[in-house]
Image (cartoon, helix red, strand yellow):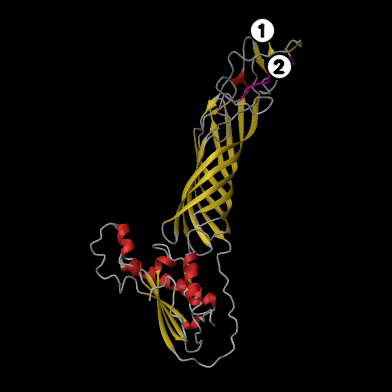
Amino acid sequence: MKKTAIAVAVATFATIAQAAPKENTWYAGAKLGWSQFNKTKFTDFGSNAAISYPTRKPGLSPSGKPFKGDYRPTQPFAATGDAINRNQLGTGAYIGYQATPYLGFELGYDWLGRIKYKSSANNGDFRAQGVQLTAKLSVPVTNDLDVYTRLGGMVWHSKAAAHYNSKDISYTGEFFYDPKDINSYLYKYPSNAWSPTTDKVNVKTSSTGISPLIAIGAEYALTKNLATRLDYQWTPKVGRGGDGNSRLDGREAAIGARPNIGLLTVGISYRFGQDEAIPVATPVTPAPTPATEKKSFTLRSDVLFNFNKSTLKLEGKHELDNLYNQLTKIDPTQGHVLVIGYTDRIGSQRYNLPLSQKRAQSVVDYLVAKGIPANSIQAEGRGKEDPVTGSACNNIKIRAKLIDCLAPDRRVIINIQGTQEINQTQPKVSL
């Protein structure tokens, strides 16, 4: 039972819910929200559009004479329109890997929505989806709440459809297009005008590309394994249809839009591997009852924890291990360990009392994990009571210097009863 006494006191801090997952763990989630399309101008072929035409394409004139040409309309048709519903439902899913407490990486899929167009010349739609890869940088606000930004890119895929009446795309003079196929041959027809029919013309196209992505958000830990987030991401220039210079394939045919898309979502995620396995205590051969002794050890919280935090640092765990190794024995039947947490006077007692309790409980959990019986150790928080600095720091006004001055008040005291032959030397521990 030698490895039991001080190990119980540190582990509880590691079990409290935290906004960021533990290091080297995975998580997965889903999200749902509002997708808004901006700069949704829909254009098609012409000098300011995205449908163009093949060059050097052989064909026949209406008179049946073959011709080869590299001609382009002098007055090309260019129907434009704006979306009638820019706000759409957006959804997605993601998986993530938490590399450090502040850095993670996410891979996700987003359905960005479908917007419709309605005008005298064009009744169509534009839709987009994408796969994103981002780095997630988090900053803790409290133990349960983080704010973050995500930076990366999205590989998007967009589809556009346009539905025209052929009377809207007629030509007179030197150039001519087949009214039933906007993407068909170019004809040279110098003498006669073309009379349109009432046939409908439907044109569809798709495109794939990459755009940068930036997002900001906040994440709140509901439990150790569940977290919810509010996330807003911005992806510019999704699609290629709004650019008159765009060329999507060998036929140079394109329609659609090139909007900027903002996506505001609420998500929920499940984090894997957040529970710490508690080792089974090794059975110990009963020994004669030793003489009961009482010992008290004081450990500075600045060594165990970061300022205003209740999660044990690696340095703090090492200090507890060093102190634990000096305990010769604790009687599992008569021994008792009381871990008391204190804070400094900065802040209200309403805030400091729970913080001191969490710190003491973290030490208890750590010692239990090392082998101390859970029924022989307990945690107690006293907040900013019983300061040891007295009035020594009263005249210090600068906050950083005041925090340093009050460091002795931020402590965890371990009172042990039932030990025998305890070495009094404690590195970095003040009695």
Compare residues 109 and 148 and report the one nearer the observer. 148
The residue tagged with tag 1: helix, strand or loop?
A: loop
Label 1: few (<14), some (14–19) or many (≥20) C-alpha neighbours in 10 Å? few
Which residue extends farthest top? 191
Q: Quadrant of residue 141?
A: bottom left
Q: Is residue 52 magenta?
A: yes
Q: Residue at x 60, y 81 (%)?
A: 282
Is tag 1's residue or tag 2's residue first in the polypeptide sequence? 2
Compare residues 287 and 265 and report the one nearer the observer. 287
Q: Quarter of the image containing the C terminus?
A: bottom left
Compare residues 278 and 50 and report the one nearer the observer. 278
Q: Is residue 391 left or right of residue 403?
A: left
Query: Magenta residues?
Result: 51-59
Q: Residue at x 68, y 11 (%)?
A: 188
Q: How many numbered marks appear?
A: 2
Q: Position of residue 51 (x, y in %)?
A: 61, 24
The residue tagged with tag 2: helix, strand or loop?
A: loop
Residue type, numbered disc 2: Arg
Compare residues 33 and 110 and report the one nearer the observer. 110
Mark on residue 56? Answer: 2
Q: Quarter of the image containing the N terminus?
A: bottom right
The residue under label 1 is 190
